[in-house]
Image: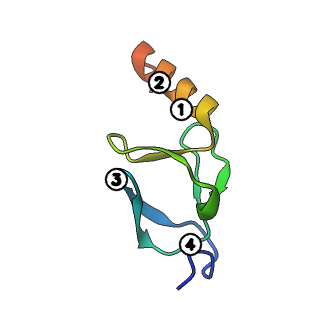
């Protein structure tokens, strides 16, 4: 089954170096911006926090939040 066949938000289990699809869907949400990230474009996530990120800037922003105690 193609990852994009089912619309809506997917639920993933993030691992290294890949992720597992727990619930089928077309996208996940960025933990920082809330933007939809199509599964075929997902490149950034945290295994520790089980979060997806839109891009490297979002990863950096989340790290700053964590280190400052705002997340």
Q: CA distance from mark 3 to mark 2?
A: 18 Å
Disc 4 element: loop
Which residue is at a point 45% across and 64% down the rendered structure image? 11
User: Which mark is nearer the camera, 4 or 1?
Assistant: 1
- The mark that comes first in sequence, 4 or 1, is 4
Q: Does residue 25 appear left or right of residue 49 in this picture? A: right
The local crowd at label 4, few if under 14, some if 14 to 19, many if 20 or more residues have their Cα within 10 Å, is: many
- The mark that comes first in sequence, 4 or 3, is 3
Disc 2 element: helix
Disc 1 element: helix
Disc 3 element: loop
Asked if marks 1 and 2 touch (Cβ < 8 Å), the reply is yes
Number of marks present in the image shown: 4
Which residue is at a point 59% across and 62% down the rendered structure image? 39
Residue 65, position as x, y percentages in the image:
49, 21
| Residue beneath disc 4 | 25
The tag on residue 15 is: 3
Which residue is at a point 57% across and 81% down the rendered structure image? 2
The local crowd at label 3, few if under 14, some if 14 to 19, many if 20 or more residues have their Cα within 10 Å, is: few
| Residue beneath disc 1 | 59
Compared with 60, 8 (above or below) is below
């Amino acid at each position: 089954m193609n990852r994009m066949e089912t619309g809506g938000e997917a639920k993933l289990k993030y691992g290294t170096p890949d992720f597992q699809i727990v619930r089928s869907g077309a996208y996940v949400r960025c933990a920082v911006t809330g933007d939809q990230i199509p599964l075929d474009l997902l490149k950034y996530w945290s295994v520790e926090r089980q979060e997806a990120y839109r891009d490297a800037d979002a990863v950096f922003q989340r790290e700053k939040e964590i280190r400052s105690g705002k997340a």
